Image (cartoon, grey):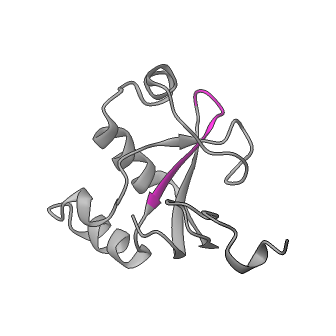
Amino acid sequence: MKASGNQTKIHYKGTKTDEDFIVFVDSEEDLKKWKGDKSIPLAQVVGLFKVFITHKHGAQGTYDEASVGQLENEFGTKVDDEVIKVILEKGEAQHGSTQEKFGSKNDSMGTLNAH
């Protein structure tokens, strides 16, 4: 998964649980290619094999990793690959600019620390 820059998330509104599920993809172009050719490995589309929920806050809000129970209740399986495929197929792409997602953001405060 790219650490910063433009990022595409796929939002899927659950039909059984009314929960909102999110998967992050590296590029919408790769997603479109995968939808047209399922022989393309998911690893070329999804950088992080995790499914997130937003606690019924749509595509916004705090992202928490979906539990096994939540996945089984909505998708009938706990297998990440199968769940991610459903979300990629039936979800809506949403774009956004993100700040750095991983790593430290404030090790020493640098020149901002004016004492």
**Residue at 36% over, 27% down:** 78
Give coordinates of residue 47: x percent, y percent.
35, 60
Instruction: Judge left or right: residue 35 versus residue 75.
Output: left
**Residue at 61% over, 64% down:** 105
For residue 76, above or below residue 24 = above
Image quadrant in which the C terminus is located: bottom right
Nearest to the observer: residue 82 or residue 37? 82
Give coordinates of residue 86: x percent, y percent.
39, 46
**Residue at 20% over, 61% down:** 38
Instruction: Judge left or right: residue 108 versus residue 57.
Output: left
Give coordinates of residue 48: x percent, y percent.
37, 53
Quarter-wise, where is residue 14 in the image? Answer: top right
For residue 12, above or below residue 56 = below
Residue lying furthest right in this view? 115
Is residue 66 in the magenta section? no
Is residue 18 in the magenta section? yes
In magenta, the rendered stretch is 16-24
Quarter-wise, where is residue 89 in the image? Answer: bottom left
Give coordinates of residue 71: x percent, y percent.
46, 28
For residue 63, above or below residue 106 = above
Instruction: Judge left or right: residue 59 versus residue 31.
Output: right
Image quadrant in which the N terminus is located: bottom left
